[in-house]
């Protein structure tokens, strides 16, 4: 068992080394796979809100402006399937359902912190690009 852990550590390389070494980002690439799981319009926003703590569906709808109830339900279902959040149903009438990040979901905090820092550092440029893009639509 220890041997397997050592081999895993030896194989681990930095993000920049990985990018420099890659010629192709296909479905077998872990970067491709991880981005496919989280890089859509709503997933990271839902995960970010859940980093504040356990939330109900209505809380999420209030905090993630613009998401439809149907899209929220779909996003939550997907995140439960991926094991990033847990869903707890209380035996009440009407039923109460709460969503909480799992350890796997919580592990996104560090990478999202980096993205937050980047967003703050480049706020002016990002807002300019966002406005231009929105105006074209």
Image (cartoon, rainbow, N blue to C red):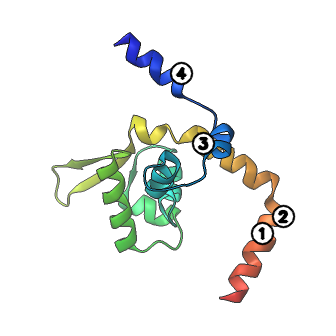
- Is the residue marked by circle 4 packed among few (<14), some (14-19), or many (20+) residues within 10 Å? few
- Is the residue marked by circle 1 packed among few (<14), some (14-19), or many (20+) residues within 10 Å? few
* Residue contact at pointers 2 and 1, CB within 8 angstroms: yes
* Residue contact at pointers 3 and 2, CB within 8 angstroms: no
Task: Look at discs 4 and 2 and give the one toward the viewer.
Answer: 4
Q: Position of residue 66 (x, y in %)?
A: 52, 74
Q: Position of residue 31 (x, y in %)?
A: 53, 48
Label 4 sits on a secondary structure element that is helix
**Labelled disc at residue 124:** 2
Return the disc, 4 or 3, that comes first in the chain's sequence: 4
In the rendered image, which residue does mark 3 sit on? 111
Q: Quadrant of residue 16?
A: top right
How far apart are the alpha carbons under marks 4 and 3?
22 Å
Label 2 sits on a secondary structure element that is helix
Task: Look at discs 4 and 3 and give the one toward the viewer.
Answer: 4
Label 1 sits on a secondary structure element that is helix
**Labelled disc at residue 10:** 4
Task: Look at discs 1 and 3 and give the one toward the viewer.
Answer: 3
In the rendered image, which residue does mark 1 sit on? 127
Q: Quadrant of residue 127?
A: bottom right
Image point (68%, 44%), residue name: 20
* Residue contact at pointers 1 and 3, CB within 8 angstroms: no
Query: In this rendering, is residue 70 above or below 59?
Result: below
Query: In this rendering, is residue 97 above or below 4?
Result: below
Q: Which quadrant would the N terminus be assigned to in this image?
A: top left
Q: Position of residue 44 (x, y in %)?
A: 52, 56
């Amino acid at each position: 068992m220890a041997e397997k852990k050592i081999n895993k550590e030896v194989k681990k390389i930095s993000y920049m080394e990985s990018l420099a070494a890659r010629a192709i980002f296909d479905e077998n690439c872990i970067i491709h796979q991880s981005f496919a799981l989280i890089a859509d319009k709503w997933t990271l926003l839902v995960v970010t809100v859940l980093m504040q703590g356990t939330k109900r569906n209505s809380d999420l709808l209030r905090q993630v402006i613009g998401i439809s109830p149907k899209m929220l339900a779909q996003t939550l279902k997907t995140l439960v399937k991926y094991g990033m959040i847990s869903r707890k149903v209380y035996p009440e009438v009407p039923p109460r359902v709460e969503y909480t990040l799992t350890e796997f979901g919580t592990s996104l905090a560090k990478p999202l912190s980096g993205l937050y820092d980047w967003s703050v550092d480049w706020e002016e440029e990002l807002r300019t690009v966002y406005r231009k893009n929105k105006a074209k639509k």
